C-alpha cells in the first residue's frame, strides 16, 4: 500500500463547555461533551521512500508547500517519525472544507487523521492509546479525534470517556472573523469556577429535555471580542432555534430538524447543515 486517498477529518461540536478551574501551569480545567459531525476536511497521503514530509493545499488558490513549523499535519507526521524511527516520508494533500478559528477542531482533526493514516501507511504499528499520547503533544483536542467516539471530556480535554449522544441534525454558522483560542483563555473576564457537572446529570437532562445542557463559559468573552457571534446567535434564535457557540468560537450551532427553514443569511457567513456521527469514520484504523 503506497497511497491513501479521500481520508476524512471530521469536525466536532462542544455541546457544552464548562471551565472548572486552572492548573498551576496555566492550562484550564474543563468539562465538555464532544460530538463528531459529518462535515469534514479530506486528506490524501502518498508514501515516499525518502524521509521528507510535506503538505500541499488542494483549495484554490494553490499556495504551494506548507512550512513544517506552521503546519499541524506536517508536525504530526514528523512526530510519528521520531516516535517510531520511521525513515519513510509522505506527501500530504489537504482539501480544506472546515473554516479555521471556528471552534470546530479542524486543524486538530487534520492532525489526528494524519497520525491514523500514516500509522497505517508506514505500518508503524502504534496502538490507539499510543497515538493519543502523541496527539496530546500537538494540542488538547487532538486525542479526541483519535479516541474514535463521541466523548465526555475532562482535564484539559484529554480525559475522555465514551458517551452516547442521540443522533441529531445541526445547523452551524460561522461569521467571517475567527478567534484566537489563546486570546479567549487569557482574558481576565473568563469564568473559571463553574461547578463540575456529571455524566449522569448530562444523560438525565438529555432524556428529559430537548434543550441544550449547561452553557459555554467561553461565549460571553468571545462575544466581546467578536460581536458577530451574538449576531449569529440572534439569527438562529429568530429562526426558533436554541443557539450556542462551540469551543472558543467563532462558529455557532443549533440543533434543528432536518428540513428546518432558515432565514436569509449574510453572504459572508458560512452556513452548514450537519448531522452527528456515532463514531469517527476511521475508528477501525487503530485498536
Image: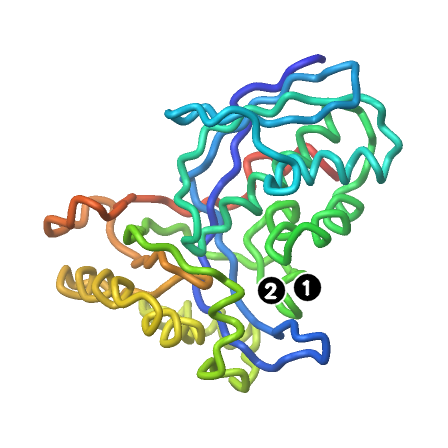
Location of residue 174 with respect to 33 vertically, above or below: above
Location of residue 218 with respect to 88 vertically, above or below: below
Please provide percent x and percent y for residue 277: 46, 44
Left-right relation of 225 to 150: left
How far is mark 1 from mark 2, CA to CA? Answer: 6 Å
What's the image's color scheme?
Answer: rainbow
Q: Quadrant of the N terminus?
A: top right
Q: Secondary structure at mark 1?
A: strand
Give the number of the disc on residue 287: none
Q: Quadrant of the C terminus?
A: top right
Q: Residue at x 40, y 74 (%)?
A: 215
Q: Residue at x 78, y 14 (%)?
A: 49
The answer to which image quadrant residue 22 occupies is bottom right
**Which residue was labeled with disc 1?**
159
Q: Secondary structure at mark 2?
A: strand
Q: Residue furthest right?
A: 85
Disc 1 and disc 2 in contact, CB within 8 angstroms: yes
The answer to which image quadrant residue 53 occupies is top right
Location of residue 149 with respect to 89 vertically, above or below: below
Residue 173 visible in the snapshot? no
Mark 1 or 2 closer to N-term?
2
Q: Residue furthest left?
A: 264
Query: Mark 2, residues whose alpha carbon is within 10 Å: few (<14), some, or many (≥20)?
Result: many
Q: Residue at x 46, y 73 (%)?
A: 204
Please provide percent x and percent y for residue 100: 43, 47
Please provide percent x and percent y for residue 13: 44, 55
Residue 142 visible in the snapshot? yes
Left-right relation of 85 to 37: right
**Which residue was labeled with disc 2?**
153
Amino acid at each position: 500500500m503506497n497511497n491513501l486517498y479521500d481520508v476524512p477529518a471530521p469536525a466536532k461540536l462542544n455541546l457544552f463547555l464548562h471551565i472548572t478551574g486552572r492548573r498551576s501551569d496555566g492550562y484550564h480545567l474543563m468539562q465538555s461533551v464532544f460530538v463528531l459531525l459529518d462535515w469534514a476536511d479530506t486528506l490524501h497521503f502518498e508514501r515516499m521512500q525518502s524521509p521528507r514530509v510535506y503538505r500541499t493545499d488542494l483549495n484554490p488558490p494553490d499556495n504551494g508547500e506548507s512550512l513544517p513549523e506552521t503546519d499541524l499535519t506536517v508536525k504530526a507526521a514528523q512526530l510519528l517519525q521520531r516516535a517510531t524511527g520511521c525513515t519513510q516520508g509522505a506527501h500530504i494533500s489537504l482539501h480544506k472544507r472546515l473554516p479555521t478559528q471556528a471552534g470546530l477542531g479542524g486543524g486538530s482533526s487534520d492532525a489526528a487523521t494524519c497520525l491514523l493514516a500514516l500509522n497505517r501507511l508506514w505500518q508503524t504499528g502504534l496502538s490507539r492509546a499510543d497515538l493519543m499520547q502523541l496527539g496530546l503533544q500537538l494540542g488538547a483536542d487532538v486525542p479526541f479525534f483519535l479516541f474514535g467516539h463521541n466523548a465526555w471530556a475532562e482535564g484539559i480535554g484529554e480525559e475522555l470517556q465514551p458517551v452516547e449522544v442521540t443522533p441529531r441534525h445541526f445547523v452551524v454558522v460561522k461569521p467571517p472573523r475567527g478567534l484566537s483560542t489563546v486570546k479567549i483563555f487569557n482574558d481576565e473576564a473568563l469564568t473559571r469556577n463553574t461547578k463540575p457537572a456529571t455524566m449522569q446529570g448530562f444523560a438525565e437532562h438529555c432524556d428529559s429535555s430537548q434543550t441544550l445542557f449547561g452553557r459555554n463559559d467561553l461565549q460571553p468573552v468571545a462575544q466581546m471580542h467578536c460581536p458577530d457571534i451574538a449576531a449569529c446567535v440572534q439569527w438562529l434564535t429568530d429562526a426558533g432555534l436554541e443557539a450556542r457557540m462551540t469551543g472558543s468560537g467563532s462558529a455557532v450551532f443549533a440543533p434543528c430538524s432536518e428540513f428546518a427553514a432558515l432565514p436569509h443569511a449574510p453572504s459572508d457567513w458560512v452556513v452548514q447543515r450537519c448531522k452527528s456521527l456515532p463514531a469517527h469514520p476511521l475508528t477501525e484504523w487503530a485498536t
